Amino acid sequence: MLKFNETNQMDSVNGALQLRGEIERIVDEIYSEGFDHIFYLGIGGTYASSMQAVTYITGKSALPVYVENAAEYLTTGNRKLTEQSVVIISSVTGSTEEMVRAVSQVKEVGARIVGFIDVKEAPLAQSVDYLISYPANEQIKFFMVADRFMFNNGDFPQYEQFYKELDGHLAKGLVEVEKAADSFGEQFAHEHKDDSMHYFVGAGNHWGAVYSYAMCYWEEQHWLRSKSIHSSELFHGTLEVIDRDTAVTVFVGEDEQRPLSERVAKFLPRICSRYTIIDTKDYELEGISPEFRGRISHLLLRAITQRIDAHLEKINCHPMEIRRYYRQLDY
Amino acid sequence: MLKFNETNQMDSVNGALQLRGEIERIVDEIYSEGFDHIFYLGIGGTYASSMQAVTYITGKSALPVYVENAAEYLTTGNRKLTEQSVVIISSVTGSTEEMVRAVSQVKEVGARIVGFIDVKEAPLAQSVDYLISYPANEQIKFFMVADRFMFNNGDFPQYEQFYKELDGHLAKGLVEVEKAADSFGEQFAHEHKDDSMHYFVGAGNHWGAVYSYAMCYWEEQHWLRSKSIHSSELFHGTLEVIDRDTAVTVFVGEDEQRPLSERVAKFLPRICSRYTIIDTKDYELEGISPEFRGRISHLLLRAITQRIDAHLEKINCHPMEIRRYYRQLDY
């Protein structure tokens, strides 16, 4: 299988899950100190992950949690972000300009910052109050913070059982999903390698991932045009430009917003012949209780799209690392 | 001028501004009763306007205000929306399925609902606690509510002066913008009538309007493909698919996020030859103080895009009223 290393990938996920002790100490300390608001702050891909975490929390908890975009924060500001607030960020390089400046502004305000910064030596890593440095797995990290806040808040009584199952089975489950999705990924990549436009539709706690898949993968890494549209919003405009030959992919997850994507999946075949439905329910996840799947189905979607990416990269002879403009020019 | 009636349009805006007494009584009553959170709830175009209002408030006030999408609310729910909350909605027909159901759910929770419902007889109009029935001008209505909440909250000391200027000059100012933009609109429509894809970029309190312009106007009413992208996010993915011949329009407003759009406007000419910059600063607005322009520059953008729409509709022989699927099919 292309770009697939079962042992490494399992180690990566298991290592992320092992951050739990550290995350629990941090969140418990913050929770007991008290706070007025929680902000997931990001830009681009990390903004997308922030949207995922906040949607995840909203339906399950009354915690005062907001998504904030770093560049918007730098201009509009946010009067709700105070010295009593908690800000959660993630950065691979620790050098994204907007994040560096936003964190510096948050520090002036005096809010506590929990930072997942992969490069421990980056100045950004030095600026956060709580540093956790471990590569990749951004969604798992963000959701672990969310889960611990909700646990403390009495919104997640099954917390221990949930993580017992993840610790035991998630890593293996995800590589098995990749294996099961590989031939689909190859076929999909062949079918859509030349798309002039591809619509990606999704909802719920994976909406951020769909937004990011269109923008940070197809546009940024494959240089293919794509548009993400929320399953609920598709019916309020975008549907009018869909016809027989329009490439549309609906991601159907398993959280509370599943019916919104099911509605799209049911409607599409009537107006379109180039649609694809990717439903995480079609994939096994051994050892994970059915009632927990909705909390992590976004990780399955990611495992599936990784198979598309691996094949698309090869078929299109377009290494995913190259950028036309990003960090190539000053702007 | 096509689709332009100066007297009617001025009457429409002035009539909306005259709702202020009613809005003030409602908001003052709610403010004095107290509330835990304010939600702007919408779907499609009204969700877009909700985003505008919430961005507008965020930088100026610590009021606990959230955007909520009606379909997401119906599935994920929102544990922060309680009987102490205030929900603000707008609906032209009063019959949009998701709104009708979401309002019914909000009523069960017991939150107070302020509704701008154009059709007074619609069942939705009967369901709200405070009904204001006056056609069009959704942004003005939403922002008037926002302004009065901020006034009560001590965040808008210039409130009276601001509205004195709007009452005296806004309606005339906006029709003058339309007149000034008409030849630009015609030229733009000719240039872009056959676009296979058009990127619309914007930020701040007009981001929602840009999102809606791409989705509710180009896609839904012109059946032309378009994608909206926030000025801050363009640099984190979408830029890679822009080249010499890509049609990109940047809307530059005058609120705090203006620098984010200016950055795009400055960068684009280096990588693209089919770009357009629409800057509200290029348009006069007699009688409105410079420091207030950022609060209403989104209305100028709307006045300008109305000129594009009028010409595009004629050139493409595509009446904006027709729908391929919306309300033509059950789904």
Image: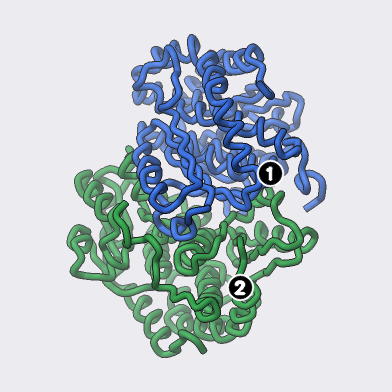
Chain colours: A green, B blue
In the rendered image, residue B161, in percent from the top left (x then y), is placed at 39, 12
Marks 1 & 2 on one chain: no
Residue B291 is marked as none
Chain at tag 2: A
State whether residue B154 is above or below residue A271.
above
B158 with respect to A251 (left or right): left
Q: Amino acid at mark 1?
A: Glu
Q: Residues within 10 Å of mark 2 (few under 14, many from 20)?
A: many
Q: Residue at x 48, y 9 (%)?
A: B168
Who is closer to the viewer here, A49 or A61?
Answer: A49
State whether residue B37 is above or below residue A327.
above
Q: Amino acid at mark 2?
A: Thr
In the rendered image, residue A33, in percent from the top left (x then y), is placed at 25, 53
- Residue A151 appears anywhere in the view: no
Chain at tag 1: B
B221 with respect to A185 (left or right): right
State whether residue A239 is above or below residue B33.
below
Residue assigned mark 1: B220
Q: Residue at x 53, y 54 (%)?
A: A59
Residue assigned mark 2: A280
Tell how many labels: 2
In the rendered image, residue B298, in percent from the top left (x then y), is placed at 49, 30
- Residue B100 appears anywhere in the view: yes
Residue A249 lies in what quarter of the image?
bottom right
Q: Secondary structure at mark 1?
A: loop
A24 with respect to B24 (left or right): left
Who is closer to the viewer here, A290 or A298?
Answer: A298
Q: Residues within 10 Å of mark 1 (few under 14, many from 20)?
A: many
Mark in front: 1 vs 2: 1
